[in-house]
Image: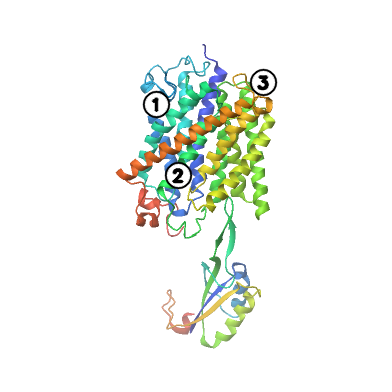
Amino acid sequence: MSINSADTAWILVSAALVMLMTPGVALFYGGMVRRKSVLSTMMMSFAALAVVGIIWVIYGYSLSFGPDKAGILGGLDWLVLRQVGQEPSAVYASTVPHLAFMIFQAMFAIITVALITGAVVERMKFSAIVVFSVLWLTVVYCPVAHWVWGDGGWLAKLGALDFAGGTVVHIAAGVSALSLARLLGPRKGFLGKEPMEPHNIPMVALGAGLLWFGWFGFNAGSALTSGGLAANAFVTTNISAAAAAFTWMILSWRQRRPSLLGIVTGAVAGLVAITPAAGFVPPLAGIPIGTIAAAVCYNCMLFRMKRGIDESLDVWAVHGMGGTWGALATGIFSSAAVNSAGANGLFFGNALQLAKQLAGAAAVWAFAFIATWILGKVIDVTIRLRVTRMEETLGLDISQHGERAYGGMMR
Amino acid sequence: MKKIEAIIREEKLESVKRILEENGYFGLTVSKVSGRGRQKGLSLQWRVGEYRVDFLPKLKIEVVILDEDVSKISHAIANSARTGEMGDGKIFILPLDNAVRIRTGEDGDNAI
């Protein structure tokens, strides 16, 4: 195939947009923790950029997208980017350089790891985070990416649809976050009902803004071409984000006051839910998908709090459950008229698609939860997952990084 | 001499400052403080649900006055800082050994 310069430009820009989402996650999460741990929270995301950015080109990309081995994993043929060059790949994104597709995918792997860190803030040792990031990428992300997106992956062959990573990114990250948070236990004072007050909500809003912006690269970039399909994904994405932000605003208003933290959380929930569907559903499907996403995530968050689980920044409620709803919604609203590579969903007379979506979501749920639990256990018995009580009291910024966010006694 | 420490509402700073000035006390020190009393706390929202913050922001005014002004000044502060609602604050009156004006080295009542 020959290279199409418009497609190439769009994929490269999209890769850059998705890259910016990880600093967005850093701000989004950083503002929601207490001031003594803001740097450590942001550091976890930047560490993903540093660590996964290297691992991906050494073996991550090959394990995920390399020539298929039994539908489970990619082979090692593309280790250290061998055979990944300026010419298009024979199987993926055949109108852009293989390198462009590879780096676009790298950004997804990075942000998925960064997303999980919201569950473990203010108490997980930084060295354990780095080790976990490497192991999790290798053992969970690469196989799941292969199942869903790899040429020959078993969920792809089954026909489970995931346009831009509702399952690969959001279910995998959200469920793993829950698993790891349960293993790690709550922050000191969490069960004593000490308020874990967000220390800088404007920072959260800035992060959410960067996420919304970057998400156009995430979803519309996943068209892998720059034509109508990208436009469809772009529009569904914005509609769903708006619908969910609006719904969450109303929910918080009904409870008491329309909160900023609420409206931005809603936007993220809507973006998560539309992710698997963006290039398979007609634009206006974004309204029900976003609206229901907000209601689902809102109630999951309430449930999580009622159960006294310190999955601190609700990665499970927003990404895990928003992603699950998105996977199912894809099976409801998808239309082969939107994307011939897709399928008709329940709404267009094909209930089977919903069953396939459910199977895909369930498989990734189970795998991510169990594999993360095992990885967490291994790290805990070797180097320990958690900082000491004293380090936790002092705050992770000083105890893990020797820095503080708001230094200087005066001025 | 006595030291007055008054915990007041943030929005009452201007009127307290004015009344002190009218009574001849231009100098004062103000700090932002947090505290709690009968006003109890404040309920804030998280992404879902609410949490309580039971330390509320107040201002602490410190001013050193002559012994004979204690009653006049404490009443003036109270009157100018009052809304009648819970949370108006408190005035503490403390004995003070001495004071020194750093620039000139004057001490005692002359330093106030």
User: Who comes first in sequence, dot 2 or dot 1?
Assistant: 2
The chain identifier of the residue carrying mark 2 reads A
Instruction: Identify the mark nearer the N-term, 1 or 3.
Output: 1
Quarter of the image holding residue A226? Answer: top right
Q: Which amino acid type is shown beneath numbered disc 2?
A: Met
Residue marked by disc 3: A337
Q: Which residue occupies the foreground of this view, A203 or B25?
A: A203
Q: Is A124 situated above or below A355? A: below
Q: Are marks 2 and 1 on the same chain?
A: yes
The CA distance from mark 3 to mark 2 is 42 Å
Whether pointer 2 and pointer 1 mark residues with C-beta atoms closer than 8 Å, the reply is no
Instruction: Please determine if labels 1 and 3 lie on a single subunit.
Output: yes
Disc 1: which residue: A57
Query: Looking at the picture, how far across and down is residue A195, in whole percent?
Result: 51, 58
Kindly report the distance in space between the C-alpha atoms of the residues bearing marks 2 and 1. 23 Å
Q: Nearer the viewer, residue B24 or A340?
A: A340
